[in-house]
Structures are given as C-alpha cells and as structure tokens.
Amino acid sequence: MKAMSRILLATLTGSMLLGGLASAQAPTKLTIWLTGDPNETKVIQTATDLYTKAHPNVTFALQALPWSDAHAKILSAAAAQQGPDIITGGLSWGIELGNLGGMVNITKEYPALDKEVKSKNLPGILQSVVTTDGQLYAMPYNLTVQLQFLRPDLLKAAGVDGAPKTWAQLESSIAKIQKAGHKGYMVQWGNLDWLGLFPYLYQAGGSYYDKGCTKATVNSPAGVKALTYFAGLYKKFKVPTDASPDLGGGLDNGNYPLGTSYSTFNLDTTYPKMKGKWTVSALPAGPTGKYTGFLGGTVIGIMAYSKNKDVAADFLKSLNDAKVSKALIENAFKAGLYFIPPRSDFAANLSLPADQKAALLKQLKDSAGPPNCPGFEASNPDLAKAVQSVILNNADPKAALDMAAATMNANLKK
C-alpha cells in the first residue's frame, strides 16, 4: 500500500462546480472499463447513447473486464496513470483507489454531484462507498440484494403457509419441508462465508465494526448469536456446503423449495417449466425484528489521471436522471439481465410481477452493504475461516469470532 501511495502522486484537479455541459468544447472520447458480465457494455450503452445524443462531441469506448482480473488491471492503470477515464468495480474499490490517489474525489471536486448522490441513494449502499470522514470517490452504479426464493406450491403441500417471516418460522418451515420428502433449504449467495453470515449478524443487532471503524465488533454477543443460528441451519438441516450450490435447479426439481440468493429474476428463462411457480420474499426477521439483507453491486467513478474529468463527471450526473435510469433498466431486460438502480424510486421501474417487485422494494428498505472500514477485504478470508470452522468443525462460535476480530483489528491499523 505504501509503495502504491508513492507511485500515485497525481494531484486531483478539475472543476469545483458541476453543471450541465451544453456541448463539449472539443471532441472528447471517454473510455469506460466495466467490471462484470460482457453484456454490461450493452446495458450502459443506453446511457452513453443518450448522452452522445445530447452532447454530439462526446463519444465513448466501452470495454468489459471479468471480475477475475479487473481489480488488478484497474490498480495497474492507476499506478501507470494511463487507461480508462471511468471504471466500474466492487463497492470498496472507490475507497481503496481514492485513498491511493487513483480516483477523483467527487466530494471535493464535484460537490453538487456529491450532494445528489448522498441525498438520493439508498442509505445502506452509501454506508459502503463513503469513507468514514465523508469522502465519496465512486458513486453507486447498480446493486443486488439478498432475497428469499420459494416455491409456494411445494411449501403449501408441505404444510408451510407462505414465506417464513422469522428465524423460528424458517426452522419450522425447513423441518416441514424435509418431513414432506424434500431435501430442504439452500444458501446460494454467501454459502459458508462471511457474506452468508451477514444478514443474521445485522438481524441479531450486530455489526462487523463499530460506527467509527475503531474496532471489530463481530465477536459481540449479537455476533455469537448470529453465527450460532447460521451454523445451526447447516447442522440441523444438512444445508448444502458445496462452493456454488444451484438454487435455481433446486427450486426447479423440487429438492429445495426454499433458499436465499442474490436478486436474480431470470429463472423463468433459465427454467421455463418453473414459470409462474416461484416467487421471492424479504428475508426472515431476526430477534430484533430487522430483516436486513446484504447489498452488493458496483460503483462508478473517474480515474484521477483522466484529462476529461468534467465531461466524465457530467456523464455520471446523467446516470441520476430518471429517464436514463429507466432506459438502463429496459435495455438490461432486453439483454436478459436485471439492472437495479441504487435508488428505490428508480428500482420501482423494474419490469417484475407485482409480488416480486413488492418483495424487492421491501428488502431494499432494510439492507446494508459491506463495511467501509480499512482492512475489511483483507480480513474476509479469516472471517470465512471462522464461519467454516463452526459449521464444518464444530468450533466454538465465540472463540472463532474472537480470532477473526483480532485479525480485523490488526488490519484496521495497517
């Protein structure tokens, strides 16, 4: 990190005021690297085409990067001071690159955009992308959230009346499902990982760190209660422990009529025989009454070395326009994807059945992203080990979390 800091000595410059650009002063080409599915370029092209229509002198070059090497390539571009003008990436990448001097500080250079993002985006996602001292280096671009997936027909046949709404109801439902001859319940997104523990931790009233990021709190009584419950699901009900369990397939063949995953809504396409037989709901509430779900997604920001910062910032501003957001949603749908904006008022435009849309919007109201604390990503492997040691090796939850917290505290100080 220190070596990278010495490399990235570029001074962040640019306009302190962001306004609409009637037209670029000269032909401008913005290069955007998009992390994720290759179809992401088709999705954002909706926004770039609309922007070019309003600003004919601005053109775009779009390049998709797979998650497997996007982070390394973007870090290399920052170090070399050469590459794209704009990037999308993981929620923590903006803070990471910003602290290294590799991204424009939106808060300082474009306060109007900063104010708009902070006032209109979901609080749960903002807590992950804004630094502890209030700086925004990359704004939320899209998101995904944990939801409960279910087959109402199979649940009803097993004596389960709809989606479980509490921890106790979840256990009772799984027991009835298994008694009816099904395998039971599956965790797809976050299986055997800190991400899988995440909702239970928050639903129990816990957190990974305190509000000021001064110390780890995952080993609090609430954290122990959450891990004990999460691990108990595996032990009591033989929840699958494979790396990438197939919840869609489990719903389709009836082996797993209930499970949790990220907010994908294309099961009708993937499993056409299941069309109309599945739905989603918000997660079951924990002892606090909270049903918090994990928010994932990507951010979008401007590289510090870009020679086109003002135009890039104006393009980012356009993504907060309702018409642009709606066009992104519609174009993603045509590509077989679901683009969920980081604003609940925009997410309401998603083309979903009424019950699924209602469940999504409800879950977005009680959701949170990963901590913005230093060293969290570096601590992820130790957190995963803690979760796995309890589930797979019957380790003591408090002892396992104490060890993870020690690593997290050490990483806070680096």
Image (tube, rainbow, N blue to C red):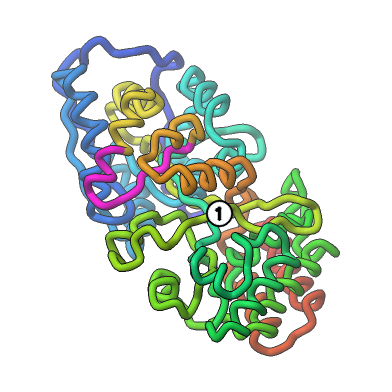
Mark 1 crowdedness (10 Å alpha carbons): few <14, some 14-19, many ≥20? many
Question: Is residue 336 within the magenta segment?
Answer: yes
Q: Would you identify the image quadrant in which residue 134 lies?
A: top right
Which residue is rendered at x = 49% and y = 67% of the image?
Answer: 153
- Please identify the dominant SS of the magenta region: loop
Q: Position of residue 395 (x, y in %)?
A: 75, 85
Please state if 385 lies on the left or on the right of 406 as rendered. Answer: left
Q: Position of residue 182 (x, y in %)?
A: 53, 82
- Asked whether the viewer can see residue 138, the reply is no
**Where, quadrant-wise, is the C terminus in this rendering?**
bottom right
Question: Is residue 121 within the magenta segment?
Answer: no
Q: Amino acid at mark 1?
A: Ser
Q: Would you identify the image quadrant in which residue 384 lies?
A: bottom right
- Asked which secondary structure carries label 1, the reply is strand
Towards the viewer: 194 or 240: 240
Please state if 390 lies on the left or on the right of 360 as rendered. Answer: right
Relative to 281, say whether 99 is above or below: above
Q: Position of residue 9 (x, y in %)?
A: 44, 40
Which residue is rendered at x = 75% and y = 58% of the image?
Answer: 286
**Highlighted range, magenta:** 330-342
> Label 1, on which residue?
281
